[in-house]
Each structure stands twice: as C-alpha cells, then as structure tokens.
Amino acid sequence: MEELEYKVLDDGSLVKKVIIKNIRPCIATEGKVRVLMELDKPLEEVITSLIFKYPPGKVNYVKKKNILTLSIYNRLITLYPSGKVTMNKALDKEDAVEIITDVMKTINQTYDDLDSTHEDNKKIEDIDLDISGIGPLNIYKCLPQTNCQECGEKTCMAFSMKILSGDKFLDDCLQLQEPWHQDQVECLKKTVGVEMMKIMGWEGY
Amino acid sequence: MIELDSSLIIIDRAPYGYEDAFSGFYICIACLNKEIDSDVLLLGDGVYSALKNQDSENALNFPSVEDLTYLIFPEGSLFVHEKSLKERGFMAKDLVEAAELINEQELYEILISKTKKTAFLRI
C-alpha cells in the first residue's frame, strides 16, 4: 500500500504531519480496521509526560519499552518512542486521521509544557509514579467516605472507580470542597500529585 | 461447538520467500479482531520477522512484515525466542519496538499459562 501523508497541524511545536503506512481491513469484523501511522517526529521525550494528560484508567504504560497505550475514543491508540502509532477499531483512514489529530494536539501541548518552568510541571518529571499502581482504593482512602451520593454515585468507592475511568471528576465531590476535608485533598496530592489531580478534574477551591 | 479461548501463532520460517510470516500475523490480527486472545511466537528463522528497518518494499517489492508486528500490540504480544535470535547474530536492540525477548523459562511460563482451549498453530 502506498503511504499517505497528511499535514494536519501547521503550527504544531513537535508533530505536524502523520503518515498512514498500513491499513488492515478486519477479516472477521466488518467496518473495523487497524491502522499503522507514523508521526513526523519521535515521541521518546514526551511519552512519560503524556501519561499525565489522561485519566489513569485510560492509560497503559510499558515502562521497559516506553510504549503508551491510550484507551480513548472507543479505540486503543498505541504510541511508540519512534513516532509510530497504531490504532484499532478505526472506521477508515479519514477517521483515523481525525482521531490522531486530536492526540497530536495533546502531544504538542505536552511538548510545550516540558519547556515550561511552572512549578507543577517540574513535579511531573520528578514524580516516580507507577500509574499502573493507582487503583480505586488509592483514591477511595482520600475521599470523605461518607457515601453522601451528592456526586451521583451510590458510594465513594463507586465514585473512585469512575474517577479512574474518567467518567467522573474530583470536583463532582462537593464534600471535598469543604474546608474540613482539606486533609483528604492533601492525601490526594500525596497519592497522585497535583498534576494528576487536575487531569482527574480538580479545579481547586 | 468448542469456543477458542486463545491462540499462539508459532512462526519458525523467515519472512520473505515464504508466506508463513504474513499468514501468521494475519491470523493473529483476525483472532484479535474477533476478541480472541492471540500472540505470536517467533522461533528459529522466524525471528527475522521482528528485525527493525526492513525495507522489503524497495528491495524486494514485497510488503513489510515489520509493519504487521505493530498491528498486534497491545492486545496481542510478539514474543521472540532469545536463543534463536542470538544464534543468528542479533541482539535485542535490533528488534522492532513491540517485541518481547523471552528465554527458555519464560517460554515455558507462556505455554503453561494458556488454557486447555488454546490452539497452537505452527505456520
């Protein structure tokens, strides 16, 4: 198959173009394809920071190989240090390009943040955080544990699971906003870090 | 009707000149698209399939097997038999990004971790 090049982000600070290298129509499932793409720059230096741009439940990071898989848009999108990207369950090449353009925007934003001297961004590099180790119990122990249901979930444990999957946000917990629950907020900062709290939807007081 | 839990595709022939590697990867992709766990194991000359920087399209006018190795990860794994690789003079750094180098003990663990309803397909 001939490679197809798309220039999608004219002013991208790291990645601007995507090349479709291979498409495999699904033999067994109609309407789905697997796509192999390559971005115009390697992603080695941004992958570890990109982890913190998505909820933990959407991220699978293979530290040994620096390979990141995102479970987003109802697809698995895998990013390799070389700049290669794979996507499953794409409808067609246009669909794949549309979705990857969105991911490229996040990549570029992450790349820009690497240069930033903002206090919280420095902490991203310093945090030796095992994303795969953050489970619902880690979040739950930092919640008020009152099961008040104001967030729309029956229990705080259910809420913590939805936080990890990205289906709920920390700000949905109104109890956390109260001044007498500051210890819980501090607990979250120590457990997942300020930047991850923002990803989880914490705007602060 | 027996339902298949998983498949392990074993490829022990070099990728170009034989169709085995292509067929093996296509079967793996088909299994994964049907949501059947599937992995590829490269043994013997099959390890050549996992070498990076293959330029078969220009050199041989043949589609690249290297591209297919990317299309099975992350749902499926690509295992490369370490002893086979070293016997052919290659090292881990010569492999595609998604390849997992496995020794004899790890090969054993992979095989016994599969359930009774695993099809072992040697291509």
Image (cartoon, rainbow, N blue to C red):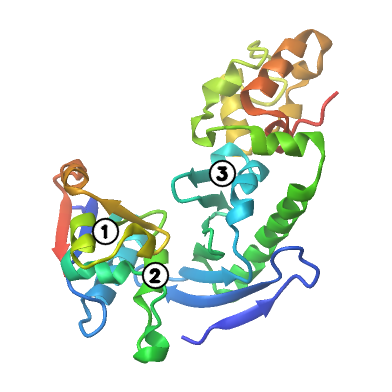
**Counting other residues with Cα less than 10 Å from the Cα at mark 2, is it few (<14), some (14-19), or many (20 or more)?**
some
Q: Name the mark nearer the viewer: 3 or 1.
A: 1
Secondary structure at badge 2 equals loop
Crowding at mark 3 (Cα within 10 Å: few <14, some 14-19, many 20+): some
- B92 relative to A95 in the view: left or right: left
| Residue B37, image x, y percentages | 30, 53
Location of residue A189 with respect to B81 vertically, above or below: above
**B48 left or right, relative to A31:** left
User: Residue A9's quadrant in the figure?
Assistant: bottom right
The amino acid at mark 2 is Lys
Disc 2 to disc 1: CB gap under 8 Å: no
Tell me the quarter of the image containing the C terminus of chain A.
Answer: top right
Q: Residue at point 20% right, 82% down?
A: B18
Residue at label 1?
A: B80
Q: CA–CA distance between discs 2 and 3?
A: 29 Å
Q: Is residue A85 above or below residue B102?
A: below
Mark 3: amino acid: Lys
Q: Quadrant of residue A138?
A: top right
Q: Residue at x 47, y 75 (%)?
A: A23
Chain under numbered label 1: B
Circle 2 residue: B52
Residue A134 lies, in percent from the top left, at 54, 29
Number of numbered discs:
3
Label 2, label 1: how many angstroms apart (C-alpha)?
13 Å
Q: Mark 2 — on which chain does it sit?
A: B
| Mark 1 element type | strand
Residue A121: x and y in percent read: 75, 39
Judged left or right of residue A150, residue B35 is left
Mark 3 lies on residue: A58
Residue drawn at x 60%, y 59% as measured from the top left: A43
The kind of residue tagged 1 is Val
Which residue of the protein is positioned furthest toward the top in this rendering?
A: A180
